Image (cartoon, rainbow, N blue to C red):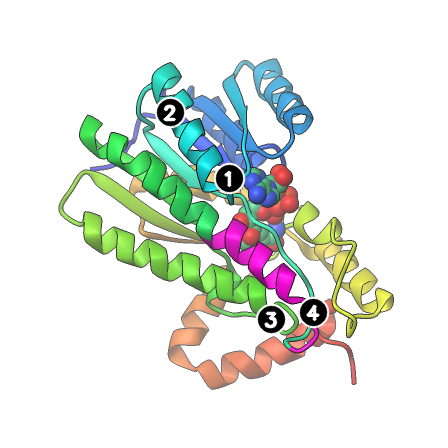
Amino acid sequence: MTNSNLKHKKVLITGGAAGIGLATAEAFARQGALIILVDLSEAALEKAREIIESRGGHCVTYPCDVSDWNSVQNLAGDIHRAQGPLDILINNAGIAYLAGVVEHPLDQWEKIHRVNVMGVVHFVQAFLPAMKQAGGPRHIVNIASVAALAPAPNMSAYAASKAAVRNFTEVLAMEQHGSDMVVQCVYPGIINTAIVSGIHSVGENISSRQLDKLQHYYRETGADPEVVARDIVRGVTSGRAHIPTGPMASLAGWLGRVSPRILRTLLIRSSKKSGYLAES
Ligand code: NAD
């Protein structure tokens, strides 16, 4: 069973104040859903709420760091008291870092793991029990990345975190099989958001020229976050378990299954073009 009618559904989106999260919030708001936005900054959340409400949507906001378990537990208590159990939980908050395997600062490895992996675990543990108890079709949608299927060089921590999200989602889906819970995983390709354009610090093996090239590539060839938002709404209404979206996502997933060797050759080539890998 899936949610084909999204009117009045309670949709929580982490990292919802910008990028893919905000576009997804707007897309669900257009369907008449109540949007519950979670992000780090109150000011950014307030701006996002104004955007959604100026277009006739309904939105409430809660500042919270997804990597902090105590904050997430308190947030879940507040949301359950004010709104009741969620219909749709979208675990979208995520961060990235660019560095070679050896040069990747360990504190950045840990930070990426805490946000990208533990953030998802925290929200599922805090919100799933009430969703299940309420019954009826409800969704957990985890935003992984095409990097979980086809990683690029100089993004080891990020790619590992997204592979973890993918497998975590798969385990959750199997555990919920036969219940009304629909568990879904999204794999965006290159999307033009601040996750790359906002990178300021990188590993010492990455030159500023290489970073400029990568950021230029994202601006020029990255899809609009609305593309992902549209595919997430479609994915929720259709109940599709795996949702590739944006440039190359479907092709990379398919090629990885058919010929990992060809995929790796193509990824090395495309990484030189995009800036993930320095030209030798
Ligand atoms: P973005 O930087 O535009 O948005 C990410 C949002 O998450 C920001 O609003 C940020 O404040 C929030 N956030 C970060 N850390 C947080 C924390 N600890 N607690 C709460 N909120 C936090 O990036 P985006 O591209 O919109 O990324 C959204 C998701 O999509 C991420 O999980 C990302 O890994 C994934 N993704 C993005 C791309 C892409 O090309 N942009 C590709 C594949 C997957």
Quadrant the C terminus occupies: bottom right
User: Mark 2: which amino acid?
Assistant: Gly
Residue tagged 1: 229
Work out which residue is located at the far front of the displayed protein and give it: 70
User: Mark 4: which amino acid?
Assistant: Ala
Work out which residue is located at the far right of the displayed protein and give it: 209
Residue 99 disc label: 4
Residue 152 disc label: 3
State the residue at coordinates (39%, 29%): 76
Residues rendered magenta in the picture: 102-117
Q: Nearer the viewer, mark 3 or mark 1?
A: 3
Q: CA distance from mark 2 to mark 3?
A: 39 Å
First reached walking from the N terminus: tag 2 or tag 4: 2
Q: CA distance from mark 1 to mark 4?
A: 29 Å
Work out which residue is located at the far left of the displayed protein and give it: 178
80 sits left or right of 53 in the view: left
- Whether ligand 1 has any atom under 8 Å from the Cβ at mark 1 is answered as no
Q: Which quarter of the picture shows residue 253?
A: bottom left
